[in-house]
């Protein structure tokens, strides 16, 4: 039976897919490019992503056709095969980047004496277990964990009220902000543009008519949380510290100083954060498996184990060290990722157009 | 030899035994199973012989990352 997720779960999956990993170190490069105006990025680029999602999903009356996309058992045209191959490559790159980023983060913050090989192997086992359980399980786990993370991020300005220096956020707006904001938007585009992954799970949303609203809600959640996080980081730490900090969000939560006996609240928050990253990676692996199933024309989980082993090894082999991974995430991914996202979008529109034409030919 | 390769080979062996013995895949689809298993072994061999795979990523970081750096940096 085909797994079903609700529109609410769909929007949380989108929000978690983009926010959970980008919150680790992305603020650093955004602040490096646009300084203390970074928090303005969210309202400035929001309309672009609403348009992006609108292009993917289209008008409400055409949404029924999504039920037949990403169905492994049917015959696929040449364009569809290219599309599945691109989705596979896109998801593989996301998995390699995020798995290594996540493992480096854990090694730096929680387990400095554990070799990254072991961390990758253990993480892969967890991700595999969640992925094989199916989309419904991924969605349920994500909702539970993301709500907690969302509440924590939303409460950050309150928890850090005694540390915020308004002077760090001033001047609030000015024309000199524009060049920096445009530069940061370029970096942010590839990260938020990962929302294109929704093409793989659209068919599972019930009722399908609500997907556009749900996707908009997901994007809205990401931007609200990102705006709060960036503004709080700038207010508390200031741009000079943030520009050189590898894990600015972790450094931010270390500043929480409510009482004397709760001085390691950061560990608790990181532990809440980790399951979100696991579910994001599990969803990426699910989408990758779906693309692979379409390529071999059979709905199956048989190939998921060796493929995840390959990706796990690649995440260690491809990056010589932590700096290499950060360089890839900050500078290579914006160009590579956005190119792939635009290619995927173009192919998806082409497939939709082909199917519409086929349907018209059948009726006439 | 690194521990992660031994773990990988053991997992892969168990996987192949289960998949083939239990008949989880049809005969037609077996070629894909062998292909991904062979790919996994190839990747582990890169670790054994210390093949510098990261050169590919460094190349990508220099070329593609260079484009972003030119656009973004002051």
Image (spheres, coloured by chain):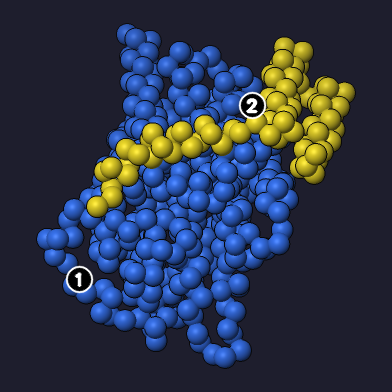
Chain colours: A blue, B yellow
Q: Tell me if A198 is positioned left or right of B5 in this view.
A: left
Q: Residue at x 48, y 70 (%)?
A: A251
Residue A67 visible in the snapshot: no
Q: Quadrant of residue B42?
A: top right
Q: Quadrant of residue A222?
A: bottom left
Residue B41, image x and y in percent? Answer: 74, 27
Residue at the far bottom in the pictured view = A260
**Callout 2: 10 Å neighbours few (<14), some, many (20+)?**
some
Against A156, residue A115 (above or below) is above
Residue A10, image x and y in percent? Answer: 48, 48
Q: Nearer the viewer, residue A190 or A323?
A: A323
Q: Residue at x 34, y 49 (%)?
A: A188
Would you name the residue on which mark 2 appears? A299
Q: Chain of mark 2?
A: A
* Disc 2 element: loop
Q: Tell me if A22 is positioned left or right of B30 in this view.
A: left
Q: Residue at x 60, y 65 (%)?
A: A109
Q: Are marks 1 and 2 in contact (CB under 8 Å)?
A: no
- Can you tell which mark lies on residue A172? 1
Against A220, residue A153 (above or below) is below
Against A51, residue A148 (above or below) is below
Against B73, residue A353 (above or below) is above
């Amino acid at each position: 039976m085909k797994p079903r997720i609700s529109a609410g779960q769909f929007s949380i999956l989108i929000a978690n897919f983009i926010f959970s990993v980008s919150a680790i170190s992305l603020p650093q490069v955004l602040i490096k490019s646009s300084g203390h105006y970074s928090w303005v990025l969210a309202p400035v680029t929001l309309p672009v992503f609403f348009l992006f999602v609108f292009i993917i999903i289209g008008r409400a009356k055409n949404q029924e056709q999504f039920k037949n996309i990403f169905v492994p058992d049917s015959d696929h045209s040449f364009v569809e095969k290219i599309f599945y191959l691109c989705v596979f490559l896109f998801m593989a790159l996301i998995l390699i980047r995020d798995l290594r980023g996540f493992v480096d983060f854990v090694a730096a913050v929680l387990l400095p004496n554990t070799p990254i090989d072991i961390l990758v192997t253990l993480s892969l086992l967890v991700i595999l277990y969640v992925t094989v359980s199916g989309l419904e399980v991924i969605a349920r786990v994500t909702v539970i964990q993301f709500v907690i993370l969302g509440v924590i991020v939303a409460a950050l300005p309150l928890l850090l009220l005694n540390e915020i220096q308004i002077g760090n956020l001033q001047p609030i707006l000015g024309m000199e902000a524009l060049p920096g904001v445009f530069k940061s938007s370029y970096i942010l585009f590839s990260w938020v543009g990962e929302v294109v992954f929704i093409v793989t799970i659209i068919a599972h949303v019930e009722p399908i008519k609500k997907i556009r609203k749900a996707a908009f809600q997901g994007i809205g959640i990401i931007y609200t949380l990102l705006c709060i996080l960036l503004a709080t980081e700038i207010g508390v730490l200031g741009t000079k510290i943030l520009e050189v900090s590898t894990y600015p969000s972790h450094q931010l939560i270390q500043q929480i100083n409510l009482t004397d006996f709760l001085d390691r609240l950061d560990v608790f928050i990181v532990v809440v954060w980790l399951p979100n990253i696991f579910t994001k990676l599990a969803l990426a692996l699910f989408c990758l498996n779906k693309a692979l199933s379409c390529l071999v024309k059979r709905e199956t989980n048989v190939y998921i184990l060796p493929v995840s082993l390959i990706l796990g090894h690649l995440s260690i082999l491809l990056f010589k060290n932590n700096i290499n991974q950060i360089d890839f995430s900050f500078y290579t991914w914006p160009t590579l990722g956005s190119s792939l996202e635009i290619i995927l979008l173009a192919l998806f529109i082409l497939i939709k157009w082909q199917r519409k034409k086929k349907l018209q030919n059948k009726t006439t | 030899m690194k521990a992660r390769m031994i773990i990988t080979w053991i997992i892969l062996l168990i996987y192949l035994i289960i998949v083939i013995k239990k008949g989880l895949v049809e005969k037609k689809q077996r070629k894909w199973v062998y292909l991904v298993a062979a790919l996994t072994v190839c990747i582990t061999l890169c670790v054994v012989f210390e093949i510098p795979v990261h050169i590919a990523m460094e190349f990508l970081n220099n070329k593609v990352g260079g484009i972003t750096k030119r656009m973004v940096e002051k």
